[in-house]
């Protein structure tokens, strides 16, 4: 009997090219399944409430400053009562502490770095204890950032430089009482030292406080400087235009120069802080050389101060109080992160995880990095595994049927029944 021409098959016969096609389909499905599985396993998770940075920096496609090896890309959670300062020696802003999402939820003791308009997290395991009651200032004399916290660690002083934290509490002493608050820190050029301002209980009875100043020079211990003649002056900063240390509260502003106090302009009605029973809440202040003057953010509004107060136009949503604010020398802009985000028109308040830049009188909200499309869920992977298994079984069955035919490749001929 003549053989069939190539490509012609009888019932039960599977051409070689078709069998090969089935094998490649099975291999392709298996590859998809394995790749999808690795995609799920490799998808970065959200550690705690932190986002991982998965987007390019806001203003440039590539970093303009090399990122130190002790930093990892990460994005801070929504924070309140955090603190930050520009580290001029390292060329970036350092942020630490606070609550996550709401008052009472203590933030981990993560150190955050703002570099190239991008957030990074310090990988060091030696860091200050988590705290919502802290102050930070840069010391140009020691070229270090100084942090003082007065709550969870029982009043500790730390220094930071080039990715390393060092506990100074054993050598620099302790300023003030435990729960020495509210805190404000700044470097006083005239004194040549860090100045810490806070409240201390008085001998006049329970619930009465004095606001006192402590000083810290490199290699020395904390020492008491003076008593502030105005209660609750929680906003403090060095004024290079007047060579004085400026303080502000809900009722006025003062300056300390050569040991003498002077009163500056009173704030406008309703600012620069929102008073609750006479107590200000979470105001932020930083010297902005582009003004030149102080940038002040209160619970509901933002102000500029240069011998007089000017309320800034409202932006929606407005950067709120209770977060961290500093002037970033590399970005040439004031950087604000966290705090209570207030929408005065809608009457809403929530904790912010947005990074704001203030430059040349304008606010800019940097985009929050977004995650890539998620990998295939496990349910889809299970379905693909089942499909791959079915295909593999079908190929095996068809191959067995092909090998069960006659050696010539034809189906055995059928004979008509005998008559």
Image: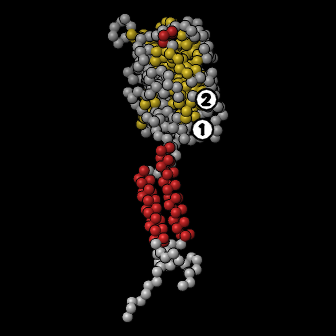
Q: Secondary structure at mark 2?
A: loop
The Cα atoms of the two marked residues, 2 and 1, are separated by 16 Å
Kindly tell me whether residue 37 is visible in this rendering: yes
User: Residue 71 in the image: x percent, y percent?
Assistant: 56, 30
| Figure disc tally | 2
Name the image quarter holding the C terminus.
bottom left
- Residue at which label 1 appears: 57
Query: Within the image, what quadrant is residue 216 found in?
Result: top right
In the image, which disc is placed on residue 68?
Answer: 2
Residue 223 in percent (x, y) is at 50, 6
Label 2 Cα crowd, 10 Å radius (few <14 / some 14-19 / many 20+): few
Between 235 and 48, the one lying in front of the other is: 48
- Image quarter of the N terminus: bottom right
Q: Nearer the viewer, residue 419 or 71?
A: 419
- Between 261 and 59, the residue placed more toward the observer is 59
Residue 338 picture location, percent across and down: 48, 31
Crowding near the residue tagged with mark 1, few <14, some 14–19, many ≥20 C-alpha atoms within 10 Å: some
């Amino acid at each position: 009997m003549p053989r069939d021409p190539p490509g012609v098959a009888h019932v039960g016969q599977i051409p070689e090219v078709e069998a090969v096609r089935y094998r490649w389909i099975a291999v392709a499905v298996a590859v998809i399944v394995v790749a999808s599985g690795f995609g799920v396993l490799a998808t970065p998770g959200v550690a705690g409430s932190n986002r991982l940075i998965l987007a390019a920096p806001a203003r440039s496609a590539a970093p303009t400053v090399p990122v130190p090896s002790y930093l990892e890309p990460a994005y801070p959670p929504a924070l309140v009562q955090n603190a930050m300062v520009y580290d001029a020696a390292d060329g970036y802003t350092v942020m630490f502490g606070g609550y996550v999402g709401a008052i009472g939820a203590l933030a981990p003791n993560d150190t955050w770095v703002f570099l190239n308009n991008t957030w990074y997290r310090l990988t060091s395991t030696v860091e200050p204890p988590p705290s919502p009651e802290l102050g930070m200032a840069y010391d140009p004399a020691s070229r270090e950032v100084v942090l003082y916290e007065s709550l969870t660690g029982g009043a500790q002083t730390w220094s930071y430089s080039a990715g390393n934290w060092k506990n100074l509490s054993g050598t620099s002493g302790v300023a003030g009482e435990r729960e020495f608050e509210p805190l404000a820190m700044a470097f006083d050029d005239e004194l040549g030292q860090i100045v810490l301002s806070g409240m201390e209980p008085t001998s006049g009875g329970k619930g009465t406080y004095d606001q006192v100043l402590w000083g810290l020079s490199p290699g020395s211990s904390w020492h008491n400087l003076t008593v502030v003649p105005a209660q609750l002056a929680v906003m403090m900063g060095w004024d290079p235009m007047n060579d004085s240390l400026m303080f502000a509260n809900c009722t006025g502003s003062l300056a300390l120069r050569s040991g003498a106090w002077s009163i500056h302009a009173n704030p406008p009605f309703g600012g620069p802080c929102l008073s609750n029973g006479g107590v200000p809440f979470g105001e932020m202040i930083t010297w902005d050389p582009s003004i030149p003057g102080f940038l002040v953010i209160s619970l509901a509004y933002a102000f500029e101060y240069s011998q007089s107060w000017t309320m800034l136009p409202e932006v929606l949503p407005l950067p709120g109080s209770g977060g961290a604010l500093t002037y970033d020398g590399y970005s040439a802009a004031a950087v604000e992160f966290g705090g209570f985000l207030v929408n005065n028109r809608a009457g809403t308040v929530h904790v912010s995880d947005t990074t704001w830049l203030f430059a040349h009188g304008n606010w800019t909200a940097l985009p929050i990095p977004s995650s890539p499309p998620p990998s295939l869920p496990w349910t889809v992977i299970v379905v693909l595994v089942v499909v791959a298994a079915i295909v593999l079984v079908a190929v095996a069955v068809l191959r067995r049927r092909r090998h069960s035919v006659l050696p010539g490749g034809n189906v055995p001929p059928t004979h008509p029944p005998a008559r």
